[in-house]
Amino acid sequence: DTAVSQTPKYLVTQMGNDKSIKCEQNLGHDTMYWYKQDSKKFLKIMFSYNNKELIINETVPNRFSPKSPDKAHLNLHINSLELGDSAVYFCASSPRSNQPQHFGDGTRLSIL
Amino acid sequence: AQSVTQLDSQVPVFEEAPVELRCNYSSSVSVYLFWYVQYPNQGLQLLLKYLSGSTLVKGINGFEAEFNKSQTSFHLRKPSVHISDTAEYFCAVSDHGGSEKLVFGKGTKLTVNP
């Protein structure tokens, strides 16, 4: 059973489009995260939710909107995609703050 | 705010040789420290963590790391590497204040050659 699963694995789309990435965890964790990994492999946190409540928003453009319908799901919607949004987006979860985070396999987003 | 410096972007070694991947951090408060590994086209997998207690921590796949508070370091070591250890390794830090986020270093690409 996959602990943290993301869909889709690959996403190729054109500039200006709107797209969503879904994330689900079956670990019973309270906290979920979105990270962005750029072409140089640098990982940076974007958002964190604890029990459906937003607790971290790291100066991400407001074209990015996370949504957590329940504590097992954290989706990422991106409006008006730009070339610079091309990256690998990772979802992660942890049982509580400062416990190790479990990562999904990533969604590779390519903007044409 | 915390920051993490991984001093080597690439480390090539021969199979069965020892390896050390260096990590230094900066923080004004006490921290938790982690090492993650990323194999090609995969997510990150936790290798080991330091939360408290013994400063020498052992992880999976024969890796270990030592927390040195005075030198603000958390270097990763393995006495004998295998081809399968070829991957990207990330050091990360989070603070005791419960900020909920991990701050990552820029990664070290370990390449094990036959």
Image (cartoon, rainbow, N blue to C red):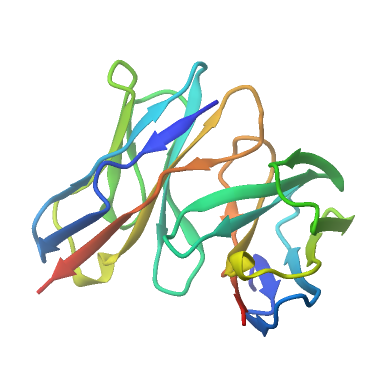
Query: What is the quadrant of residue A13 in the picture?
Result: bottom right
Along the line of sight, which residue is nearer the eye, A1 or B98? B98
User: Percent x, y for residue A22?
Assistant: 76, 70
Q: Say above or below: A100 vs A83.
A: above
User: Percent x, y for residue A110?
Assistant: 60, 78
Q: Locate the N terminus of chain B by quadrant.
A: top right
Query: What is the quadrant of residue A83 in the picture?
Result: bottom right
Query: Residue at the location (59% across, 58% down)?
Result: A36
Q: Residue B42, can we see it? A: yes
Q: Residue A104, can we see it? A: no
Q: Say above or below: B83 vs B48.
A: below
Query: Residue at the location (64% across, 73% down)?
Result: A1
User: Percent x, y for residue A87?
Assistant: 56, 67
Residue sitting at the far right: A69
Query: Residue at the location (78% across, 77% down)?
Result: A17
Query: Residue at the location (47% across, 22% down)?
Result: B27
Left or right: A87, with B111 as reference point = right
Q: Locate the C terminus of chain B by quadrant.
A: bottom left
Left or right: B6, with B81 as reference point = right
User: Percent x, y for residue A49?
Assistant: 78, 46
Q: Say above or below: A27 vs A99.
A: below
User: Number of marks in the image?
Assistant: 0
Along the line of sight, which residue is nearer the eye, A65 or B47? A65
